[in-house]
Amino acid sequence: MTREETTRHGGEKIATSKTALITGITGQDGSYLAELLLSKGYEVHGVIRRASTLNTQRIDHISQDPHDPDAKLRLHYGDLTNMAQFANLVYNVQPEEIYNLGGQSHVATSFEMPEYTGDVVALGTTRLLEAVRLSGIRSRFYQASSSEMFGNEPPPQNEETRFNPRSPYACAKAYAYWMTVDYRDAHNLHASNGILFNHESPRRGETFVTRKITRAIAAIMSGTQKKLYLGNLDASRDWGFAPDYVEAMWLMLQQDEPDDYVIGTGKGHTVRDFLDIAFSYADLDWKDYVEIDLRYVRPNEVNSLVADSAKASETLGWKPKVDFEMLVKLMVDSDMEQANLKPNGEGLRALAKVQTWHGAPLSPGSRL
């Protein structure tokens, strides 16, 4: 019996909620996924790394008093390099669903830290899968795979496209992907890979190119920045809105049978396209501010990634709700607000009209 079913207490049937464990809960995807699961009545357990300073700003608005016995969000210290920690955590929490979103997530950084990237992303996934196997608990497992695994295979890419990784990050993700498949086949785990294409939001890390652009616009308009330094402007990516994508993660673990799914919008845009929309939205010309710095060009470039998500659409019933232009505009609006500037507001108004579970963070006192 799982917690989504009913239990007997004093002769009465009482509905109980599911329990989920999220690694990387303080990241962009983890914070949105936590919101989604809480909105569905889950008890959510998140794993955070111990550090001298807190890094919980993305989930502060949903944090709950750990002393409250009825708290639905609980945080635990853990590290994907330590299997013993996760073996104990899985056994003690006994989650119905595990979402592995943790790890070193920056492609450029992986060239500088290849060993660490492999240890956390590739072996970290193996440690977590092994912890599930050893526990004997029939948890459903979601692995955050990446479109970077496809490398320069011609777009559009789908579940049948071969992997051609061109960075330590992509190599580590490919290893983790195949370990997830192996544990599914060898140990009969309900383990699924979500091959997610680029997904952005106002919570995106500040060193990722999309957020780097929108933050620069706000800084330029406030007079604190004069130039924006970027690398390859012709790299093309399939960019979507992160809250749409975490909904796809959840849908994968609601299926009777585990499987692997490509998730994306099906439309590619270059970094130059992003600049055009973002700067013109702020009544600026990006050519006046952007300069090329070869330090930001990858040793192995991936030219074009565009998703073919037909399988996810047909099987999961999943489709993105936020298009590229709306995404760019709402990110500019958000960074303008954070810089205490008055935004155009078109992006935020458009998002408010989209009927999704992600309506709450638009309310006062919460984060987009």
Image: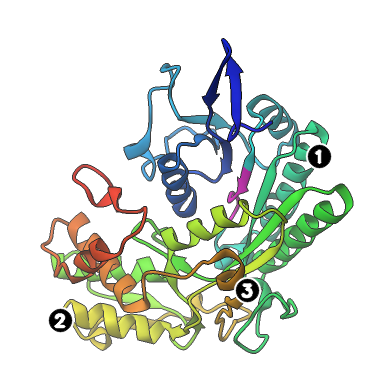
Q: Is residue 312 magenta?
A: no
Residue range (magenta): 98-104
Amino acid type of disc 2?
Asp
Does residue 225 appear in this view?
no
| Colour style of the rendered protein structure | rainbow
Amino acid type of disc 3?
Lys
Circle 2 SS class: loop
Which residue ends up furthest to the right in the rendered image? Answer: 186
The tag on residue 283 is 2
> How far, Cα to Cα, is label 1 from label 3?
28 Å
Which residue ends up furthest to the left in the rendered image? Answer: 342
The residue drawn where x is 27% and y is 67% is: 330
In this rendering, the answer to whether 137 lies above or below 316 is above
Q: Nearer the viewer, mark 1 or mark 3?
A: 3
Q: Position of residue 352 (x, y in %)?
A: 24, 61
The tag on residue 133 is 1
Q: Mark 2 or mark 3: which comes first in sequence?
A: 2
The tag on residue 311 is 3
Q: Nearer the viewer, mark 1 or mark 2?
A: 1
